[in-house]
Image: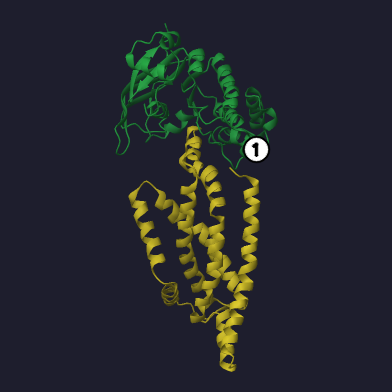
Chain colours: A yellow, B green
Amino acid sequence: MTLLLAFLAVAMGSVLALIPALMRLSPYKALRVPATFYVEIIRGTPMLVQVLLIYQLLNIPLLLIGGIDMGSFVPGLVALLINSSAYISEIIRGGILAVDKGQGEAARSLGLSESQTMRHIILPQAIKQIFPALGNEFVTIIKETSIFMYLGIAELMYQIGILKASSPAVTELYITAGILYLILTYPLSKLMNFIERRLRHADAK
Amino acid sequence: MQTPNNPIIQINSLVKTFKGTLHALAGVDLTIQKGEVVSIIGPSGSGKSTLLRCMNLMEVPTSGVVIFEGEELSIKSKRINQLREKMGMVFQSFNLFPHLSVKDNITLSPKLIKHLSDEDANLLAQKLLQQVGLSEKIDAYPNQLSGGQKQRVAIARALAMNPDVMLFDEPTSALDPEMVGEVLQVMRDLAKQGMTMVIVTHEMSFAKEVSDRVVFMAEGQIVEINSPELMFTKPKEERTKQFLKRVNII
């Protein structure tokens, strides 16, 4: 559950994040300003507030699909998506800015349009640059799913909450939860490291 | 010095001001004739690279006009991409695409823009790599090449769009001395084939050897335009003399 939420949030969030990222890099103020506004609001308010707000706005009745309660899964996913897209858009923007200016110039001098240059030259290089940061965001989001206990999503911390009622060993329960999160995130970090090395091997400058 | 009047690039009263600086270009007029090789020399900061970069609007002039093959360039027009195809550019820092193989570096824009088939693109890459003497590197990646090889691939890449003029922005300045020769040789061959070339360079003996005309710039202005023989032996202007003396030519 936690993993599914985090994975969907990062995967879909990365695609969504391209929109504010490109808007903020645009030469047009009309595009830059709303994107900046969006990113700053999402980054400047607590995740918990966003989650509760979206839970209220998307009042979906209890509906079980494949054993998952959509009433809490959908708002949870939407909230995570919005949150991660804002953070990831900043990562992408940084990645695009980190690509050497000469790359774009070389592409434009060959007659490529602005969008062709972005797609074929800038983005492929930016993605490699941002991979470590993206992995980081993935791990962060996995941990942030703990917020969803407030929504009643069957999720690690929530289950600990249930157990707590029947067990006096509260500290041990929290430590167990922490270890379970670590078991989830550690292999991911390792996997990201591995993919990163592979990418770097393919081409160093 | 009698060149037929068949201009390919015309530059009229070009001014370029960078934020917070003096004039990088303070009103420059220059016409490049079809088939001629023009070298631009001058001290660093004289505006010679800026002038070259204005020719395909890599740098957008503050004011003034650039006319290429009879058409005024405008950064706002969609035509700019089609016109840039016809002006190959070679950069000081190569700017090869590190995530693409040598072959893909060369064939990217012919495939994207001219919709060349894979087969035709392969043939084109082979032909161009042969021309720059790097046939065996077709599947290599840029990070596996030496500086001189990178620059030769960059020249092949610029030639892939079949340009009418080649713009060289200090093509050997970032190279180790032993690699300068191989790049100059490729450029020399290109000049012999009749390619129109504009070369910003610090290689004075090369400029003297291949150029039809040499332009000397200082402080954002053209100080002197002369034949290579006269420029390097009997320059007209005092500032030219001083510069050439400093670089040990006279």
Quadrant location of the N terminus of chain B in the rendered image: top left
Residue A160 is drawn in which quadrant?
A: bottom right
Residue B42 relative to residue A177: left or right: left
Residue B43 position (above or below residue A48): above
Quadrant location of the C terminus of chain B in the rendered image: top left
Residue A170 relative to residue B34: left or right: right
Q: What amino acid does circle 1 point to?
A: Gln
What residue is drawn where x is 54% and y is 72%? A143
Residue B154 position (above or below residue A28): above
What residue is drawn where x is 59% and y is 70%? A4
The outermost residue toward the top is B2
Spot occupied by residue B179 in the image (x, y as percentages of width and height): 59, 26
Q: Helix or strand or loop: what does disc 1 sit on?
A: helix
The outermost residue toward the right is B136
Q: Is residue A154 visible?
A: no
Residue A141 relative to residue A183: left or right: left
Spot occupied by residue B206 in the image (x, y as percentages of width and height): 51, 17
Residue under label 1: B144
Q: Nearer the viewer, residue A146 or A31?
A: A146
